[in-house]
Amino acid sequence: MSHTEAIPGSSLSAARRTRELTEATEGRTADVLVVGLGATGAGVALDAAARGLDVVAVDAQDLAFGTSRWSSKLIHGGLRYLASAQFEVAHESAVERGVLMTRTAPHLVCAQPFVLPLTPMVSTAQASLAWAGLRAGDMLRLAARTPRQVLPAPRRLSATEARHLAPAVRGAGLRGGLLSWDGRVTDDARLVTALARTAAARGARMLTRVRVLELTGGGARVRDELTGEEGEIRARVVINAAGVWAGGLVDGIRIRPSRGTHLVLRSERLGELPAGLHIPIPGETNRFVLVLPQGDGRVYVGLTDEPVEGGIPDVPEVPETDIGFLLDVLGSALDVPVARDEVVGAFAGLRPLLDTSEGDAGTRTSDISRRHAVLTSADGVTTVVGGKLTTYRRMAQDAVDAAVAAKGLAVPPSPTADLPLVGAAAPERLRALPVPSRLVRRYGTEALAVHALATEDPALAAPVLPGHPVTHAELVWAARHEGALDESDLLDRRTRIGLVPQDREAALAVAREVVAEGVLG
């Protein structure tokens, strides 16, 4: 591969989509049809393709259109699940975190420091319990065999150290802090894009804007949302990975969504944040509001865990009650509380929790297990639900194992625990790339090609809007190689400019120019 090219076979474009959709609906039978292209669905497509299966994967919208772009951008080690005695989930999370950080995506997933400031709001007993939890989390790291140099040990901080790492925290009465480390992904939607492109490089046909109208164990009736044309995709194995929409495709699947809301603040509001923050939620023993610096001029504050009733919207709304709750908890730890008009954006995602309550509506969604489930319907559709971003790979592996076993197909075991995603390389090689580190964290080895676009055409080196680091070259790259079909794909998922409505409006003209210039072909 030259420095100006994408990984061979991995480029997703409008032309490739058109060609492969025609192939998928012309009557041949694929080995596997995957419905849903969030992290789990894209992971299923990669898992199946990596085992040598012929794969078609579809989504009614775009890559990472649903829950997978609304996460906290964290790759959790499972500490919270220890507190609720979900030991299997905790260990699985720690293992999958290590896989991402050391083998499959070290360019996208790195260590994130967090400070739990010991303010007067945190009692001595709470501090002792939190410290014990952090030590237990480090034992999870050890059990998962993640090296210490990848995730450092937790330690206690003096008041001076805590103030240095968390300068916005209220100084009066600060007794110190607790420093811990977890995994974080540069961008959850970029992880999904990398999964989809890695699957495409293995021959999978990754088709966005293709809506499933009817799903059976032998395939699906679909509609091209760009043209309105309908067709049929036949497959030996069908896997439903549609997340919160999974129950609408297969009878008997009951999803109980939980809303997780985040606020978006300008970085200057909280000042320099060398670390994220854990702020205890009053009255809760193991729940925190997280303050998450993004390195792009923004900070996220989250998150809630509220049950959602009624229909599932394409894009969940953020209620004022969630915003008020997060601001109240955040304000309990700051010198100067954040005002409502300082919130420049907000987003909410719906966790696709499997409802096994048997009519017990009183169970809080925060208490429902995050363990994923794989279910096969009477007509042979395998559905995978639950879980979380961190464990997408294991969810995909389990779904493919169950689906091929149900149809009696013999396939090799999953190789994805050791399969690098597009752009992955050893940390020392990534550090040596002669391009801005921000590009390396988003594109890995392909940062060379993205940077070359801007070098060859200086107009593409300009930022899309003042004060935000995304360049014109990144929009062009997204259109040519990452399957972006319109300005929403460019602004809301391939980049995250759209998380701030004011920024989205300012960037819209540039995104439309990229589309109009025909680079999508």
Image (cartoon, rainbow, N blue to C red):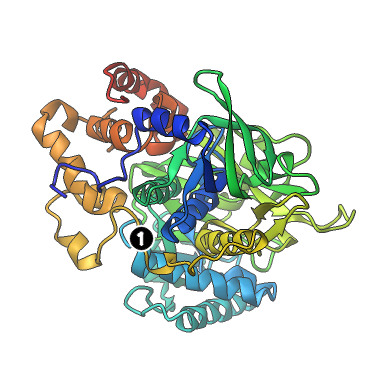
Q: Is residue 21 left or right of residue 450?
A: right
Give 329 or 234, whichever is nearer the viewer: 234
- Please give the name of the residue rendered at 49% of the width and 42% of the height, measured from the top-left corner: 64
Residue 61 placement (x, y as % from top left): 53, 32
- Please give the name of the residue rendered at 49% of the width and 49% of the height, measured from the top-left corner: 42
Res 369 → quadrant:
bottom right
Q: Is residue 451 above or below residue 293?
A: above
Res 470 → quadrant:
top left
Give 190 or 361, whichever is nearer the viewer: 190
Q: Is residue 389 above or below residue 101?
A: above
Amino acid on which disc 1 is placed: Ala
Give 428 or 234, whichever is nearer the viewer: 234
Quadrant (top left, top right, bottom left, bottom right) of the C terminus: top left
Q: Residues within 10 Å of mark 1 (few under 14, many from 20)?
A: many
Q: Note whether residue 67 is visible.
A: no
Task: Name the residue at the right extreme.
Answer: 359
- Please give the name of the residue rendered at 10% of the width and 36% of the height, measured from the top-left corner: 455
Residue 63 placement (x, y as % from top left): 47, 39
- Please give the name of the residue rendered at 28% of the width and 28% of the height, measured from the top-left corner: 464
Which residue in the protein does label 1 denote?
105
Q: Note whether residue 423 is visible.
A: yes
Residue 169 placement (x, y as % from top left): 46, 57
Regarding mark 1 in the picture, which secondary structure is present there? loop
Residue 20 placement (x, y as % from top left): 42, 34
Q: Is residue 449 left or right of residue 356?
A: left
Res 93 → quadrant:
bottom right
